[in-house]
Amino acid sequence: MAYNLLKGKRGIIFGALDEKSMAWQVALRCYEEGAQITLSNAPIALRMGKINELATLCGNALVIGADATSSEELENVFNKSIEHLGGKIDFILHSIGMSPNVRKKIAYTESNYDNFLKTLDISALSFHKVMQTAMKLDALNEWASILGLSYIAAQRVFPTYNDMADAKALLESIARSFGYHYGIAKKVRVNTISQSPTPTTAGSGVEGFDSFFSYAESMSPLGNATAEECADYCVTLFSDLTRKVTMQNLFHDGGFSYTGVSVDLVMRLASTMK
Ligand SMILES: NC(=O)c1ccc[n+]([C@@H]2O[C@H](COP(=O)([O-])OP(=O)(O)OC[C@H]3O[C@@H](n4cnc5c(N)ncnc54)[C@H](O)[C@@H]3O)[C@@H](O)[C@H]2O)c1
């Protein structure tokens, strides 16, 4: 059901690869709620993914290629988006993550440091670059809302999440720090959503993903949050109904983050001890 929560708003969605992507679902929901959007992803993802299908579903949205580690390419995304959408931007989704160490199955304790720097650059510093570029170009309207997507490995150890855990800790810190400055400068809100494990290309690439997923499912009183539910949450945070929410890391995980242990898990462990 649509509520017109984003009627008249203009947004940029970074990171939709295919229909499993969190950004894909967010783009669909934002369009459904009355927003006009542009889509951006890395040039290789434009070639390999299905972003043009999404663009069609979102009212022939403009697709703009950009490596999010390049400030010049991000400038192009903002300039083209403002020109195409006919005004400054009201919301941004940063849904970008990649770790060469995870991809190459290199253990955390044996991290290759060139890979590590790439993980931080793509998965965290790019969030800073998106905001720095927007600020430099004065590309956002007052009360604009910026979201990044995080994971609870920023706070607790999930051993195979590898250097992405450090990238998420940095991402959340950047949201707080930039959120302060952007709030003062232009009343712009900056938050991260810490989402349940979700079966996407990036998510499934983490070693042991299926176990993470079912562990979280059995630990969450409401069950894991899906990508579609994450999209609903993003819409509320892009809307005018959450104007004073900023500099937060917001758990969207069915209660996982505050559950010590669940009855379901205790029963299952007990049955293995008999
Ligand atoms: N899937 C999960 O379990 C989960 C849980 C919590 C948070 N997240 C986060 O959600 C975000 C989106 O991931 P997803 O799960 O939808 O997977 P996904 O693979 O669909 O999306 C990741 C995106 O990052 C893009 N990307 C990678 N390098 C880039 C670069 N240099 N420049 C621009 N874009 C680049 C990819 O092309 C891809 O579209 C990531 O930040 C991820 O860490 C995912």
Image (cartoon, rainbow, N blue to C red):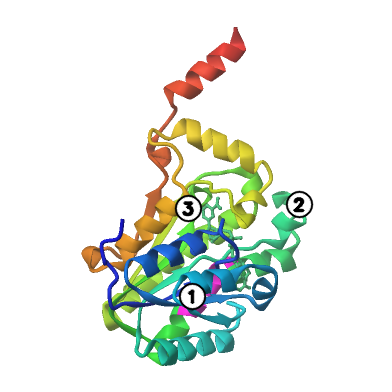
Residue 265 pos. (x, y %): 50, 24
Disc 1 CB within 8 Å of nearest ligand 1 atom: no
Distance from the alpha carbon under mark 3 to that under mark 2? 25 Å
Compared with residue 102, is residue 216 higher up or lower down, i.e. above or below?
A: above
Q: Which residue is mark 2?
A: 105
Disc 3 CB within 8 Å of nearest ligand 1 atom: yes
Q: Secondary structure at mark 3?
A: helix
User: Crowdedness of circle 2 by 10 Å Cα count: few (<14), some, many (20+)?
Assistant: some
Q: Which residue is mark 1?
A: 128
Q: Which numbered dot is residue 227? A: 3
Say whether residue 228 is left or right of residue 33. right
Question: Which residues fall within the magenta stretch?
Answer: 123-130
Q: Is residue 21 magenta?
A: no
Q: Is residue 83 visible?
A: yes
Distance from the alpha carbon under mark 2 to that under mark 1? 27 Å
User: Crowdedness of circle 1 by 10 Å Cα count: few (<14), some, many (20+)?
Assistant: some
Compared with residue 222, is residue 32 higher up or lower down, i.e. above or below?
A: below
